[in-house]
Image (tube, coloured by chain):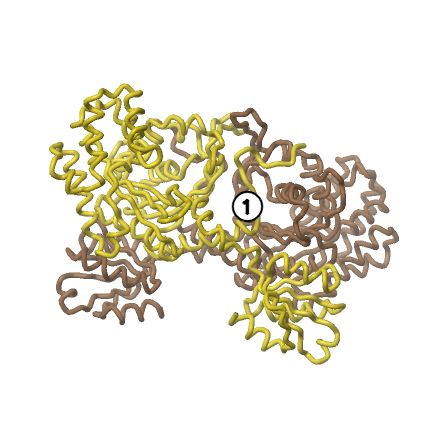
Chain colours: A yellow, B brown
Amino acid sequence: MTLQTPKGMRDFNPEEKILRNEIVKTLTEIFELYGYVPLETPIVERYDVLSAKFAAGEQSDVLKETFKLKDQGNRDLGLRFDLTVPLARYIAMNQGLKMPFKRFQIGEVFRDGPIKLGRYREFWQFDVDAVGVKSVLAEYELIKIALDFFKEMNFDAYIQVNNRKLVEGILIDSGVKEDQMQSVMISIDKLERIGLKEVLIEMEKNNIDGKTINNIKRFLSMDDKLEKIEKIIKNDIAKQGLKELKELFGLFGKKERKDVQFRFSLVRGFGYYTGTVFEGFLRKNEIKSSICGGGRYDNMIGNYMEEKKEIPAIGISFGLDTIADAIKTKAKKTNVKVYLIPIKTEDKTLKIIEELRKSKINSDMDMNQRNLSKNLDYANKLDIPYVLIIGNKEIKVKKYTLRDMKTGKEQMLDIKQIIKKLCSS
Amino acid sequence: MTLQTPKGMRDFNPEEKILRNEIVKTLTEIFELYGYVPLETPIVERYDVLSAKFAAGEQSDVLKETFKLKDQGNRDLGLRFDLTVPLARYIAMNQGLKMPFKRFQIGEVFRDGPIKLGRYREFWQFDVDAVGVKSVLAEYELIKIALDFFKEMNFDAYIQVNNRKLVEGILIDSGVKEDQMQSVMISIDKLERIGLKEVLIEMEKNNIDGKTINNIKRFLSMDDKLEKIEKIIKNDIAKQGLKELKELFGLFGKKERKDVQFRFSLVRGFGYYTGTVFEGFLRKNEIKSSICGGGRYDNMIGNYMEEKKEIPAIGISFGLDTIADAIKTKAKKTNVKVYLIPIKTEDKTLKIIEELRKSKINSDMDMNQRNLSKNLDYANKLDIPYVLIIGNKEIKVKKYTLRDMKTGKEQMLDIKQIIKKLCSS
């Protein structure tokens, strides 16, 4: 037997998991503050649900990277590759749902792709989506959620925003044909990572003609100044996109506006986006990948229904790995506050630890009759802030030795004093 | 495309998921109070890890019911069927871990078995295990955790306890041969569900001879009186089990002892248990299945290591489905406290909702310009306790109409009064 996890999948040790739980908690509280409700769908979906062509769009890579399996009834199943397709399936199956349906979902998703720096075969997504709202108020709300989250985490971060209609209109006028649209968008999306020159080379390789490339280059060189673009666009789709963007930006106060920036090259990969798209990034940080991203997709959900109809929707997804990386210096090995060391006083120690736990103090004790120095070493290795030493001498006077593991300072305190000290520190 | 979830797998709608999240939160807080740390392992494991013969023991059913899959590298993988095997694999891979390792893990597990009443192919487990503790203090701690949980949930519930050594010793002396041991134990475990007569018939069918069955019957008829059993056992293994049981029961106070009962027929299905086993049940409730269960397994983890050694361990697993069933009357459709209805006052309403959220009040608002009666209907359907109506008249006087959706009572209040009322209600 090979003792390892599957390739591209990871264990998260307690230190990492405590950190991840804190991020989940912070996000969940914000989502609920904004009126979103939790939903849970299975890890496994029917393969035909996952493989619907309007789901991942042109990105057939996602489907190639879908883990397939069968059940005993020989049904074709797959591990979900995102949380958006299951949401669409859920909405289509529950057409009596009250709209808008504002839900969040947190869980593992799977891609059986190549393992690269920071790319895994199992990873977590945190999705918030507002289904059944066409108004730009939904865009505003999701971006606000991201800004609230940045504040809560003390992140110096900002959101880049664009609109697919604006880009599509401009590309049409630039000479991009319908069947080239997705490929050109994917090239543009790489601007930040590979630079203008490489983007133009990639378009050339994809048989985009020189004049068209030159037209696109003009927009890519406008330093993301919406006013410059506004002056020269004629296309109606682009104008609609521009209108939506200006309406959205207008909702933010001056101070927030600094953290919400227009970015022409931000278009995102999925084929299903129909309007606003956005991504969040850290400033002055070694982590360059986005920490969240999303956009409006007004057509995808309706496609799952027998009677096709437009179900407007917009969502944002937070990437747990990137966020955890950004705060990994804050990791704790345990949430235990005090470690009790009985010296042949197990019975009494059980009573004392019960008191501490009744006061909601996370407490642990030695159950292996180890000696004092081994126990101190254990508490020290786990970064437990306090130990409480309980010998027969201590039991007699009903005062116990509380040792601050950081300073080494020891105090003899009774149970009330101990509780008071631990609750306030 | 068939719009459905895979057979035996379920969506949990917001109402169900809010309830499940509350159970998770309650359990997590208790686990941390007792010094346990969270661990996360992948949903997918290598198939050879799952299929190790010392894992699920004689229960080869579990392996037959394991969902198999492959990755692009043609590696054999499977969906985990419990959280204990991944724990054992993790311990074996991380031999530098400080012992005891007290961890909890929460997550989905999978069994591709027949769908019956209350049996699903995807379900959640909440496991707490103390690894590296041989002392009965660990047994005591896990049972205390269950009792604390019952109290926190207002459950009238109790724990049945037994010891595999006691049963094994008695069965040996009754004439059960080694290769019959597992099958006899599985029959005895069914006593509660199928009754004494059927248990004896099942043993007969499994070729246990009449005399042996009669010997076993004697113990099954002792009304779970430990004193009766004590008087007649001679076998040393049984005596050791008895000693462990008495030591454990001795740790509980008189009041708790009422909720911790000896039960001779409780032996549990898995082959890997080596000592104490226990299960928790509700009293006077239509739910008859156990809400938690576990036991000591001192040999399993060490078997995963190249240099075999004994790694004592004990764990308890809580079943989310049963617990959720038991409290389903407490379900809420949303955690939203107030729903804001702007009457052509979106911009001002955004400011007001921001104030509410800053005060940590879960708030939602209409983003679809619906009329008042549609909005009231929406809030009513979702059981949102309050709505706040914000028209231009209200904006002028800076007082808004707060409607209690239960009583229908309306009050004109300023923002401070609203926050005060919502925070205190």
User: Which part of the image, by quadrant, shows the N terminus of chain A?
Assistant: top right
Residue depicted at 53% across the width and 63% down the height: B152
Viewer-nearest residue: B67 or A169 = A169
> Horizontal and vertical percent for residue A154?
39, 56
> Horizontal and vertical percent for residue B73?
54, 25
Image: B121 above or below B215? above
Viewer-nearest residue: A216 or A136 = A216
Image: A115 above or below B33? above
**Which type of secondary structure does the marked residue at label 1 adopt?**
loop
Question: Label 1: how many residues lie within 10 Å, few (<14), some (14-19) or many (20+)?
Answer: some
Residue that mark 1 sits on: A12
As drawn, the residue found furthest toward the right would be B234
- Left or right relative to A71: residue B241: right
Image mark 1: chain = A
- Left or right relative to A380: residue B404: left
> Horizontal and vertical percent for residue B327?
49, 56
Residue A277 in view: yes
Residue depicted at 68% across the width and 78% down the height: A398
Viewer-nearest residue: B117 or A299 = A299
- Left or right relative to B291: residue B184: right
Residue depicted at 22% across the width and 40% down the height: A223
Question: What is the number of callouts on the image?
Answer: 1
> Horizontal and vertical percent for residue A325?
46, 47
